[in-house]
Amino acid sequence: MEKKTYSLIACLEGEEYKKVRGIQKELSELTGSRKCLEDWQPHITIGDGPLLSEEELKDYILALETFVKNNKSVTAKLTDFAGIDNWKGARENITPYVLWANVEVSGDLLNIFNTLRDNLTSKYETWLPRTVNYVPHVTVAFADLDEEGYRKGLDFLSTKNLNTNFKISHVSIVECYGEGNMTSVEYRRFYFSA
């Protein structure tokens, strides 16, 4: 039975979405990198990426519905920017350069991640190595970012002050596909009870 690759994310919404999307657009104009704009909404990954058959997906959805019913939304904080020039996800046609906004690790956010990992994703095969040390972030440029763009992007981001809180109101399951599973489409969004 064929399995598909998915990720668990929470999309930014409202003013925070606009702020990060604006930065992504400015970065794109400066660096030529378009992958974040074309293939992903600004988001934070909140769970390991399951590899699921159609039947497993049905069970997974039921488990996510129970999870959001029994948990509440949390507030997280975007802080500063960072980057890496040797991303391990790089391969042919996917560069090793990544820029992101850091997300402060709070007890509430870590609890969401750990609960999803321990009670849900640990029961399924994943298409990426399981996350050991959770480092939440919002990627602002990757995959088609070259070395010159990376350097320009780091300089540009050093002038930006992000420090803003945002609400994690939901869990989205997105299907990942394409080369290296670097393109996504939101499959379904599950809102927390409050």
Image (spheres, rainbow, N blue to C red):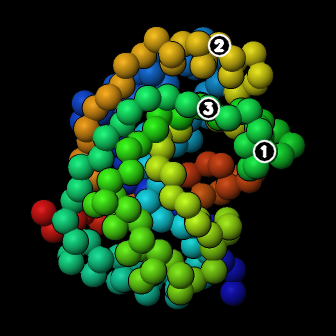
User: Does residue 127 sit above or below 35 in this rendering?
Assistant: below
- In primary-sequence order, the first of circles 3 and 1 is 3
CA separation in Å, label 3 and label 1: 14 Å
The quadrant holding residue 133 is bottom right
Residue identified by numbered label 2 = 152
Q: Nearer the viewer, mark 3 or mark 1?
A: 3
Residue 68 placement, left or right of 152: left
Please name the amino acid that badge 3 sits on: Gly
Residue 39 placement, left or right of 190: right
CA separation in Å, label 1 and label 2: 20 Å
> Is residue 63 something that shows in the picture?
yes
User: Does residue 47 sit above or below 153 in this rendering?
Assistant: below
Residue identified by numbered label 3 = 83
Q: Residue at x 36, y 36 (%)?
A: 78
CA separation in Å, label 3 and label 2: 12 Å
Residue identified by numbered label 1 = 90
> Is residue 43 something that shows in the picture?
no
Please name the amino acid that badge 2 sits on: Lys
Q: Residue at x 69, y 17 (%)?
A: 151
- In primary-sequence order, the first of circles 1 and 2 is 1
Q: Residue furthest left?
A: 194
Q: Residue at x 56, y 31 (%)?
A: 82
User: Does residue 37 sit above or below 172 in this rendering?
Assistant: above
User: Does residue 17 sit above or below 122 in this rendering?
Assistant: above
Residue 187 on image: x %, y %: 44, 62
- Which quarter shows the N terminus? bottom right
Residue 135 on image: x %, y %: 51, 51
Please name the amino acid that badge 1 sits on: Ala
